[in-house]
Amino acid sequence: MLRVEKINVSYGEFQVLHEVSIEVKSGETAIVVGPNGAGKTTLLRVISGLLKPTSGAIYFDGHRIDDKEPHEIVELGIALVPEGGRLFPYLTVYDNLKIGSFAKRARGGFRRTLEEIFELFPILKERRNQLAGSLSGGERQMLAIARSLMSQPKLIMLDEPSLGLAPRVVSRVFEFIGKIRSQGYSILMVEQNARKALELADHAYLLESGKLEFHGGREDFLRNPYIKKAYLGI
Amino acid sequence: MFEQIINAAINGILLGGVLALLAFGLNLIFGVVKIIHMAYGQFVMLGFYLIYVLTVQLHVPLIISSLIAICAMAVLGILTQLLVIEPLLDAPRLNQLLALAGLIIVFENLAMVIWGADYRGIPLYLPILHIGNFYIRFSCLIAFLGALMTLGLLYLFLHKTYIGLAIRATAQDVEIAKVMGVNSRLIYFVTLAAGGALTGIVAAFFTPIYTVHPHFGSSFTIMAFIIVVLGGMGNLLGGFISAFIIGIVTSVSAVLTTAEVADIIALLIFILVMLVRPQGILGVRGT
């Protein structure tokens, strides 16, 4: 479904990603694990079209997307849940969800998708007329996930969904991600909380200093002695 | 004396409505494109001249020439975005300011070359309403009501349509708006077109009140800018409130002193508010 082929990405002189290749198959969940500054967020920004790679190619559903604009990529069915949620704080919960369905492919089904979302996240229905900025940390993250679902995506990319949340809230957020996964969406998640994230993963990648150091199925990943020691604390 | 002051305050409120419209446009452009449209008042001046030419020289009915001017100013807004703002979107702020300030010179001298320095007006005699000891110019009342109606329509546009929602989202976080599927380039063009159309509407309301000359716009650029900053940049409600404050202050102090001193008083109030509340009356908020 999504294939990233040997991309190189630089911010000015500074190269952030080196020859990175990953793949997310339809219906699968892939996790990218790595320390701060490894280039995880950059990887998602490049796939969303916010940043252009200097070389390499990205394919999604048979389309080459690395030269496309972000709004064209959304139309193909990729949604991003950015780090920290990045809601529109002065828009209501309802308007945040509505802008989530801005893509032409999603607009027609706005009402129906909204009903589904409200069933999945009843708290958002209660708070629909509140400004998004007034929500708690956990509610914000859920609204950010809900907003991405409004575009009726095929692939959802999540950037550090557990960042800055209390442990109890983190469990709830991962529970929701698990629910979404079971509905058949493909997921690409970038996460520092490796142990939690790996519970959901079909496939995992280790990204360090902009290079892919290891990748494999969940079991291979969990058995790797270096990953065990450095990321899982076992 | 007291009646005169009340009368001036009424005129100030009526004028404030039109100023609110002008400030709204400037604010919208700043909020969405993050650029200060220095030549905004000059758009009004060009719109006014266009209506003058169409109505007085070509004998087109005033309503039609106003509509033409509104469309023409929207197109001018789009051209400004295409030729001046877009190439400088990532340039330093100062370069953007200077480029747009350059437009002032271009527009004013263009007007000077075409129409000369004479004051030109559209002969239009509207009645003055007398209510007790107070009088209200009918032209000001129309401008006021028209401005409020336009603001109402703008509110509906921003809050009830997908494109309006996209404009508000872009104002808050352009990057995330993009990954929601919003074509930000298109939104910038829509914003400049709407801002341009607003100057055409303001020009139409001004035609029965003022006469136009090449420097007609400069005082309105300053006025709109003061209102926007006073209300809090990017805050549409703050701009609305401060438009009426500035309108009332200038008209009342013009009665108590002279028109020149009135401007000084308005600017003094502006400076004082900036010293106490640099973020403006309502601070910076989204639309």
Image (cartoon, coloured by chain):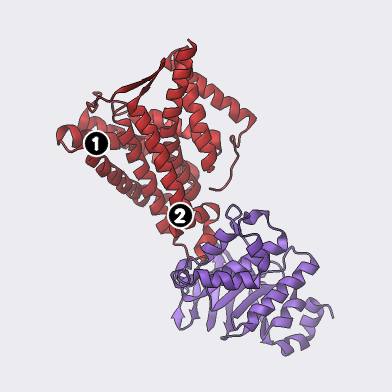
Local secondary structure at mark 2: helix
Report the residue at 52% width, 28% height from top: B245
**Residue B111 vs residue A181: left or right?**
left
Q: Residue at x 75, y 64 (%)?
A: A165
Determine whether the residue tagged by mark 1 lies in a helix, strand or loop. helix
- Asked whether, in this view, residue B138 is left or right of residue B229, the answer is left
What residue sits right under mark 2 in the picture?
B164
Q: Measured from the top left, where is residue B287 in percent x and y? A: 53, 48
* Extreme residue in the front direction: B132
Q: In the rendered view, tell whether residue B52 sits above or below residue A227.
A: above
Residue shown at 44%/57% (left/top)? B161
Q: Colour of chain B?
A: red
Q: Quadrant of residue A33?
A: bottom right
Check contact, mark 2 vs mark 1: CB within 8 A: no
Mark 1 = which residue? B51
**Given the current orientation, which residue lies at the most extreme top position?**
B1
Query: Is residue B20 found left or right of A208 in the rendered image?
Result: left
Sort mark 1 into few (<14), some (14-19) or many (20+) by Cα contacts within 10 Å.
many
Task: State whether residue A17 appears in this view.
Answer: no
